[in-house]
């Protein structure tokens, strides 16, 4: 087992918006019902960027980030039987109360007292991390650790597409082709959607969508979105389901305006401000407007199965990698190159578990 006596490690702390430092900390011990894991890759998501800019309303400082990751177990608590050193894992990072109405209904992803690792509780931006075993989910042995770090955003997509029910044979429009929109589109396609289109004003994102096998991309700044939808889906049929993954006023407007009567619109994006929605038109057309938030562990497991079966393409989404001590540079790079960025990964221990560390 890993000896943690007086062993030191690196930990990255954001003390205030935009201020990041690497500190020395003590390697945690594996207490009962806990695992000590060594992160391999950590993904940076849109919510992390909001924290960096001081725009996340629910994250206090200082904060240790890191909720999208792949890792390897290096030590287990007494009596552990499911996990062992050497197991590759990801985490389901939601800390719920288990007592409120949503939790009792199995909807702990919208727990009234929800905290998320890397936001309201300490994240994984360190050489070693102690997590409760209930947050760990095994990764397949043949899955790369890079791909494993993308299971969290893929789980978001799995839950979002699941909101639409049986997607088999349906025509789908995804507004916003960033990482989440891309994964929603791929998940819908993998679920049997007959045709999936993505809309975005960023040509890089549309190109990545094409690389991932999405049926078509639309740039609404260059062509009429409604006319293209009618051409691709049929003038009367249009989209059966629309996923809004952009999170801006124009996006939700487009979703409502281009929907046919009876279309289901699922809001996946997180809005910084409250958008205006033409509810009179929603009413008139009997549109179904629903939201989706995060995921459950079952969604994470479904994401792992989806990726493990090769039904989604993940590598094209990874545009950049930085070292653990380069968190600040990673954010600066994202700010300076936002038009070209999809998913940025932080390398912590990309080689995974080395038994010589025992």
Image (cartoon, rainbow, N blue to C red):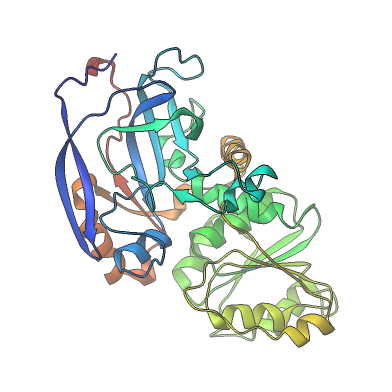
Q: Is residue 27 above or below residue 169?
A: above
- List x then y, in percent, for residue 308: 57, 35
**Residue found 14% across the figure and 23% down from its top:** 6
**How many numbered badges does the structure rendering display?**
0
Q: Residue at x 21, y 21 (%)?
A: 4
Whether residue 210 is visible here, answered yes or no, is no
Residue 129 image offset from top left, x and y in percent:
31, 34
Above-or-below relation of 270 to 161? below
Outermost residue, front direction?
A: 99
Left or right of residue 100: residue 205: left
- Quarter holding residue 38: top left
Residue at image point 63% right, 49% down: 158
Q: Nearer the viewer, residue 60 or 10?
A: 60
In the foreground, 157 or 186 = 157
Residue 85 located left or right of residue 202: left
Nearer to me, 34 or 221: 34
The residue under the point 71% across, 56% down is 163
Q: Is residue 216 visible?
A: yes
Percent of width and height locating residue 9: 18, 34
Toward which corner of the image does residue 123 lie, by quadrant?
top left
Pick the front one: 339 or 102:
102
Picture coordinates of residue 307, whole percent (x, y): 57, 40
Q: Quadrant of the N terminus?
A: top left
Q: Relative to 13, say whether 340 is above or below.
A: below
Q: Quadrant of the C terminus?
A: top left
Asked whether, in this view, residue 23 is left or right of residue 92, the answer is left
């Amino acid at each position: 087992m890993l000896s943690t006596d007086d062993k030191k490690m690196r930990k990255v702390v954001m003390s205030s918006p935009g201020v990041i430092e690497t500190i020395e900390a003590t390697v945690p011990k594996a207490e009962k019902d806990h695992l000590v894991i060594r992160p391999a890759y950590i993904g940076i998501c849109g919510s992390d960027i909001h924290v960096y800019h001081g725009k996340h309303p629910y994250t206090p400082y200082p904060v240790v980030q890191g909720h999208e990751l792949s890792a390897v177990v290096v030590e287990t608590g007494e009596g552990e039987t499911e996990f062992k050193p050497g197991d590759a894992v990801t985490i389901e990072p939601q800390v719920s109360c288990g007592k409120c109405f949503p939790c009792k209904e199995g909807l702990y992803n919208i727990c009234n007292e929800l905290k998320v690792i890397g936001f309201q509780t300490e994240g994984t931006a360190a050489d070693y991390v102690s997590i409760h075993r209930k947050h760990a989910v095994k990764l397949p042995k043949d899955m790369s650790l890079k791909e494993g770090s993308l299971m969290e955003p893929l789980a978001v997509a799995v839950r979002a597409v699941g909101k639409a029910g049986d997607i088999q044979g349906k025509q789908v429009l995804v507004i916003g082709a960033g990482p989440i929109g891309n994964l929603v589109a791929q998940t819908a396609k993998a679920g049997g959607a007959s045709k999936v289109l993505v809309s975005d004003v960023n040509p890089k994102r549309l190109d990545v969508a094409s690389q991932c096998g999405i049926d078509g991309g639309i740039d609404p700044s260059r062509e009429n979105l409604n006319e293209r939808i009618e051409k691709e889906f049929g003038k009367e049929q249009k989209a059966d389901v629309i996923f809004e993954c952009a999170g801006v006023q124009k996006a939700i407007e487009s979703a409502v305006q281009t929907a046919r009567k009876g279309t289901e619109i699922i809001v996946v994006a997180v809005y910084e401000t409250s958008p205006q929605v033409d509810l009179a038109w929603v009413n008139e057309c009997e549109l179904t407007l629903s939201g989706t938030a995060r995921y459950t562990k079952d969604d994470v497991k479904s994401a792992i199965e989806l990726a493990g079966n090769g039904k989604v393409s993940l590598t094209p989404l990874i545009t950049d990698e930085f070292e653990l001590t380069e968190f600040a540079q990673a954010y600066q790079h994202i700010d300076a190159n936002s038009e070209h960025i999809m998913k940025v990964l932080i390398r912590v221990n990309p080689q995974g578990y080395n038994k010589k560390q025992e």
